[in-house]
Image (cartoon, rainbow, N blue to C red):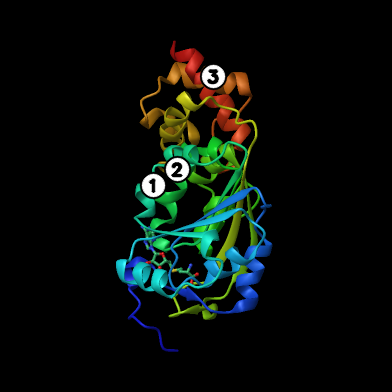
Amino acid sequence: MKLPFLPKKEWGQNFLLDKNLLQKIVDSCPFDKKTIIVEIGSGYGHLTEFLAKSNCHQVISYEKDAQLHFWLQSKWKEQKNKVIFLYQDALKINWPELRQKYNQFLTFLVVGNLPYSIANSLIFNLLESAELFENLVFLIQKEVAQRWVATPQKYKKEYSALSVYISLITKPEIIFFVPKQCFFPQPSVDGALVRLEIKKEIQLEKEKRVQFWAFLKNCFRHRRKTLWNNLLIASYQEKKIREVFQKLKYEKNIRPQQLTIQDYLSVFNFLQIELK
Ligand code: SAH
């Protein structure tokens, strides 16, 4: 396979060439003619082409690699007015500003065959502005995907603070796995397509989410320790921890991996009240 430029490994340049797979990704995306699709990482435009052929309203595609961006812009022939290519680092997108530029009545879908190195930072940025979007669909490393969708029952070993935080804001789901052989050049691990539907009602006000995230990180800091000990290490007073555990009827030896998002919200809310 000959590409115009040498793939840059550090920018996660593992391209998708299989047309069936590209179509399958588009078919897994929830959108209609009022949707603006924001693509992260145009690459050679393989996915962009399939997105542009769909009945969406518009595609805005970001690329950080100048070589690829300008090459693609000069070659692009199809549906010219439907696609906007932007040369920009996706981690620096001002999402509220972008959203504001477009008609209030359009829905926003963010999609990408993501460079593995930016997946977690990008999802964080997007969750911070979650109310701007309806859905996010990403092809990411299989292990990262499992971490994103993990619960105390599913992918238990991957269940982490990030899994809980993601499930506060979205309904995440792995749609299908993608063997590493489907990418060029081939990465060392398989991928998975994940769809995150933003919840219409998020159970925690925006102002409290930063605090909740810090709290979750404390709860999972030492995975082998009990929740009780993790809270102690995070400097919560033992008396307060005891009160919360009594109220919620938790065994003292409960581990962070056993609590659901609802449990974490309860503990967090109780500790908030107790702290006042
Ligand atoms: N969508 C294409 C390319 C996927 S590879 C395909 O599926 O074939 C990932 C792409 O993201 C690469 O082109 C890489 O240069 C680009 N990229 C890497 N880091 C980026 C960033 N921070 N912002 C935007 N694009 C980035």
Q: Looking at the picture, how far across and down is residue 260, in whole percent?
A: 61, 38
Q: 89 or 36, which is in the foreground?
A: 36
- Residue on which disc 2 sits: 98
Label 2's element? helix
- Spatial CA span between label 2 and label 3: 37 Å
Residue indicated by mark 1: 93
Quarter placement of the N terminus: bottom left
Which numbered circle lies on residue 270?
Answer: 3
Q: Is mark 3 on a helix, strand or loop?
A: helix
Q: Where is residue 239 in the image (x, y as percent from the top left)?
A: 45, 16
Check the image and report above or below for 131 versus 62.
above
Packing grade of label 3 (10 A; few <14, some 14-19, many >=20) is: some
The quadrant of the image that shows the C terminus is: top left
Q: Which residue is drawn at 62% across and 49% down?
A: 35
Which of the two discs, 2 and 1, labels the residue nearer the N terminus?
1
| Amino acid type assigned to the residue bearing label 3 in the image | Phe
Please state which amino acid type lies under the numbered disc 2: Leu
